[in-house]
Amino acid sequence: MTKVLRFHLDEHIHPAVAEALKRRGIDVTTTYEAGLSSATDLQQLDYSQEERRVLVTQDADFLRLHRAGQPHAGVVFCRQKRLSVGDISRGLILLRECLSAEEMVNHIEFL
């Protein structure tokens, strides 16, 4: 596996997840940091693809965009209410260890 996963967290993911990943040296952006606070789901997905970042979300609209054939750099879908910040962070770290950026293209993983 060559390219290491980089993440983009949408506004539905708690900011503490980004902080936990950054403390471990993982490259991660947030919707707020990227200036996308008022962006549509499609704009978020386009940004993630342009930046080659896996989008992390709990918004099911991204699953619909995937099913409709919208290209993307990868989506990690999680239900934040079911998972703690630590659970989400550990899940993303594990995905980063197991999958490459190339393997995530147009692929969805569920936490």
Image (cartoon, helix red, strand yellow):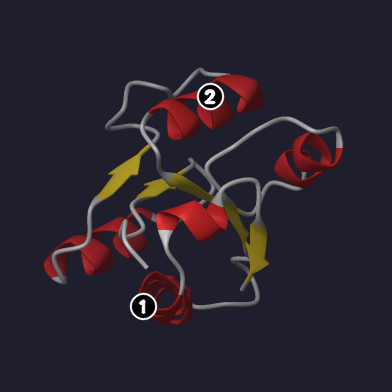
Disc on res. 46: 2
Q: How many marks?
A: 2
Q: Residue at x 53, y 28 (%)?
A: 44
Which quadrant would the C terminus be assigned to in this image? bottom right
Q: Say which label, 2 or 1, has the lower sequence index.
A: 2
Specify the amino acid type for callout 2.
Asp
Q: Mark 2 and 1 residues: CB-CB less than 8 Å, in contact?
A: no
In-image side of 77 versus 91 (left or right) = right
Vertical arrangement, residue 41 with respect to residue 58, above or below: above
Q: Considering depth in this image, is 54 or 12 the residue closer to the camera?
A: 54
Above or below 35: residue 61: below
Quadrant assignment, res 76: bottom right
Q: Is residue 26 above or below residue 35?
A: below
Q: Could you say where residue 27 lies in the image, as x and y percent from the top left? A: 23, 53
x, y (%) of residue 12?
A: 54, 47
Q: Residue at x 53, y 24 (%)?
A: 46
Secondary structure under the numbered disc 2 in the rendered image: helix
Side (left or right) of 17 relative to 109: left
Where does the image place residue 83, in percent across and percent down from the top left? 57, 77
Q: Secondary structure at mark 1?
A: helix
- Mark 1 — residue? 97
Horizontal relation, residue 78 to residue 14: left or right = right
Q: Position of residue 14 (x, y in %)?
A: 42, 56
Tell me the CA gap for discs 2 and 1. Answer: 25 Å
